[in-house]
Structures are given as structure tokens and as C-alpha cells.
Image: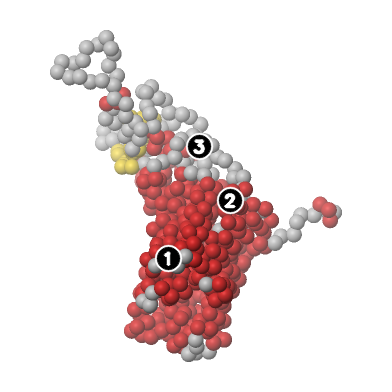
Amino acid sequence: MTEAHAPPRSLGALEPLRDGTFRTIWLSSLVSNFGQLILGVGAAWEMTRISPSADMVALVQAALMLPLMLVSVPAGAIADMFDRRKVALAGLGFASSCAALLTGLDAARLTTPWTLLAFCSLIGGGVALYGPAWQASVREQVGPAQLPAAVALGSISYNVARSVGPAIGGVIVLAAGAKAAFATNAVCYLPMLAAFFFWRRPLVSARLPPERIDRAIVSGARYVIHSPPIRTVLVRALIFGLASSASAALTPLVARNLLHGNAATYGLLLGTTGVGAVGGALLTGRVRMRLRPEHAINACSLVGGTMFVIVGVSHRLAVTAAALAVAGGASMMLIAMLNVGVQLSAPRWVTARALAWYLSALTGGIAAGAWIWGHVAVRVGVGGALVASGVVVILMPLIGLVLPMPDSSYDDLEPVDLAHEPDVALALTLRSGPIAIEIDYQVDPAQARQFYGAMLTMQQARRRNGAFDWSLARDIADPALWTERYHCPTWGDYLRLRGRFTHADRALQSMVNAYHQAGAAPRVRRRLERPFGSVRWRTDTPDPPGETIGFFSP
């Protein structure tokens, strides 16, 4: 092969950056992360100026983080319902506008403590709105083979900003005041706003109108609940957040109590943690290629937990900093692989909602764990709490014996166009319903147990795609006859259920159909329950005595 035709040299963990769209958006996200961290520094410093209360200062971080927990789930539903590019633009535009307005209020000296908290929450809400749309769009920008590295690069952008962003924010506040930090935050969202504006996202034509927001949230929650792979990842993310949050929550006390240092010591520890996290994110793709997800996550747990124990017993700055760097790398690698696990287990129609639930599980675990380990530290000391946290993290691989990480295939989640359309003789609208679906199977009684086990798996597939009230019945007069039955609230919901059929669902249906012994395909009946709207009286036919019944459009 000549040099002119040689394939381009692999960039390893940086391979996704070859794609121009991903590279532009990723660099813009790095700038926006700097802006978000600079906002936190400026808001906290401004709160110390306008309020002497330590509680109000502490509420700044809560105001910035709370929207991530409250807005992420509906934001994920919105990102799945509408064009993710436009959703990201809306969130970024809102956050930038609120930051600009806060800059003006602070320049005019009109900022009060509660005004500052309100604007921090509004900006955080804008960030929470575009977050799921941005994460879910990653797999539309890179191929499946590059997805783990692309997700890891998303983590890198935040940790690079976390390493030096607070220091930059401190310099800006020191030089020009908090209003300059707020203005910087507003400007830092503009590159990402421009990147999404000029991105020509491949459009996927939708056969049906989007769901209502409440229905979309319920659909996402039901998919997560009835999808064993995603449910496993969420449980493990929650437990990891609970177990490992002692490090982030108690690092200030490590600097003061264990190392007898000052604010500079605390800043150094934060910096080394961020640097370690960047290194861990860079290694995520390579580790995932060489190890199965379960083995990789277990290795990260063992390494990270051991480092937490070392931090808890160390009284030397160099040892503590090195341990936190390694722990930061192991934790970031584990979090990135959990994120990839969600994305490889969720079909396109529900990706953003699944990621939103993952983010809520992880941040909820971290928030609750910080409170728990704080109380533990009061009783047994900072070192004791960190050692206990490390031991719990080391024991986390035991969870894999009960909830092993899924080995999902991206191809299995691609949608399938069903070969046939339902026969419809009634004048139905998308709002007609409820719709009852019944499927008859003729199964050899000798295979009843195997068929029943396959149908339990089918139950999960039906429910996560939108079916309600699923049941399986066996005819008492004909033991070979089995009837699967479920409901959809409306005809539109049934059509959406059909549109969510994936290659994995088709393989499952084929496995179930293999038990059918009648030769032809199983018989399917679709019924309109309470069919008042389907009754149309002829104009030349008198109404029944004592009744006046006209056509009702459901």
C-alpha cells in the first residue's frame, strides 16, 4: 500500500475529533464549561458581598445544581420529542440571556441575595435543558465504534475546565468584580450556540406528531423501568454516587484537618483531581476495547476505593494529591462507561430521556451520599469516613454478581420497519381509544414452560415500548391455546409502539413465534374498547326510542 493511500493514523482517545461537527461542538462545550464554573465563583463571591450569611453562600451551589435534578427528566423528554438541535439552541439561548441580564443588574447594583439565587437557578435551568439534547446528539455525530471515546471526551471537557476554571474565575473577579464573571459566563455560551446553529443535523422524518410532555415523561420512565440493561446501569450509578461522594464532599476538610493546609492546599487537591479525571477519560476508550464493561467497572471500583482509603489515612500532601489524582481518573472512567452503557442500551427515540434518568440517579446519589458521609465524619472523623467510603467502593464489584453490566449492541437498537400495516375498517383518529390487542398462539403443551419463559421477556419488551395491562392467558378447554393481551391508551399510542420496534424486538418476536404450531402466523386482533365514537347512525334511520345518539368523534 502506497503512502498516499495509507489509512489515517489512529488518534486513539481523540479519534472522534476527526469529525468536524463533533470537534466544533466539543470545543464549544469546553468554553461553555469554563463559563459555568466562572459563574459559580463570581456568584459565590458576590453573595459574600451582599449577604453575611454562610447559609446564603452555600445556597449558591445548590441553586446552580438543583435544576440538573429537577429539569433533566422533562428536558430529556423534550429532546426526544423535538429536534435536539433546536432544543439545545433554546437552552443555550435562555442561559446566555439570563447571564446577560444578571450582568446588567449587578452593574447597576440592583442584585439582592434572592435575586442572585433566582438567576443562578434560571441559568442552571437553561444548562439542564440543553444538556440531554447535547449528550443524546453525540451518537448522531460519530459512529458506534467512536461513541465510547466521544462520551469520554465530553467528560474531559468538563474536567479540563474544572482543573483551571475556578482559578480563572477568581482572577476575573479580583480584577473586574463579579459582574465581569457574569458577563464572561454569558459570552462563553455563544460559541456553543453558534456551533449548534450551523450544525446541519440529519433529519429523520416522523410519521406521527410528538407526544404530549406528560406522556413523553411517562414513556421514558416506563422504558427505563422495563429495560433490565438501563435499570442495571441506573442502580449502579446511584450506588456509586452514594459510595464515592465522600471524596468530593470532604476534600476541604482533608486539606484543613488531615493536611493542616489552607485554601491553596484545597485548590491544589481540586486541581490534581481534575487532572486525574482528564487522564481517566482519555483512557476510557482504550480500556473499554480491552475489557468487558463489567471487568472494567470492577477494576475502576477497586482502584478508586483503594485511593479513597489512602486519602483517609494520609497526612502527607504529595501522597494525598497523588491518590486523589488516581481516584479522579478511576471515578471518571467508571462514570463514562456507565454513560456509554445507557447510550448503547437505549434506542434513538428514548436516548435523551434515558440519559436524563441516568444523570438524575448519579447526581441524586452524590447529593444524598455527601449528606450521609458528612454525618459519618462527625462521628468517626474525616479520615474514618473516607476509609469507610473506600471500603464500600472496593466492595461494589459484588453488585455485579446480581446486576452485571449489559453487553449491548448498537445495531440491535436500530428501528425496524414492520412489513404490514394493521387492517382498519373503522374511522379512527390518533385520539381514538383505548385499543386492546390480542394475539393467539397455538403451542405444544410439552413446550409450555419454555414458551411461558419467553413470554415473560416479551412482557418487558411490550411494556417498555408503551403497552399497558399486559396479560397472558391459557384456554382451559384447549391447553394449546395461549392469548397475549395488552392495551394502548389511544390509536396514536399503538402506532408509536409499532414505530419503536427494534431489531432486538423483532428477534424476540421471532423466538416467540417459533413456538406457534398452527403453521400460519399467530392471529392478531385489534379492538377499539368503548367504541361509542365508531357508531354512526344513518340520517334516514330514526334514533332508538327514548335515545338520541349522534356521531361522537373521540
Residue, far left: 546
Image-based side of 399 in relation to 328, left or right: left
Residue at 39% x, 48% y is 217
Residue, far top: 540
Image-based side of 328 in relation to 550, left or right: right
Quarter of the view holding residue 542: top left
Residue under numbered circle 1 = 110
Residue at 33% x, 38% y is 489
Residue, far front: 108
Label 2 Cα neighbours within 10 Å, binned few <14 / some 14-19 / many ≥20: many
| Number of numbered discs | 3
Q: Earlier in the sequence, mark 2 or mark 1?
A: 1
Q: Earlier in the sequence, mark 3 or mark 2?
A: 2
- Amino acid at circle 1: Leu
Image-based side of 334 in relation to 380, left or right: right
Inter-mark Cα distance, 2 to 1: 33 Å
Q: Do the residues bearing badges 3 and 2 touch, measured as CB atoms within 8 Å?
A: no
Label 1 Cα neighbours within 10 Å, binned few <14 / some 14-19 / many ≥20: few
- The numbered disc on residue 421 is none
Badge 3 marks a residue whose secondary structure is loop
Residue under numbered circle 2 = 196
Residue at 45% x, 67% y is 109
- The numbered disc on residue 206 is 3
Rendered-image quadrant of the C terminus: top left
Asked whether residue 344 is in view, the answer is no
Residue at 36% x, 23% y is 426
Residue 137 % position (x, y): 55, 51
Residue 459 % position (x, y): 37, 45
- Closer to us: 378 or 187: 187
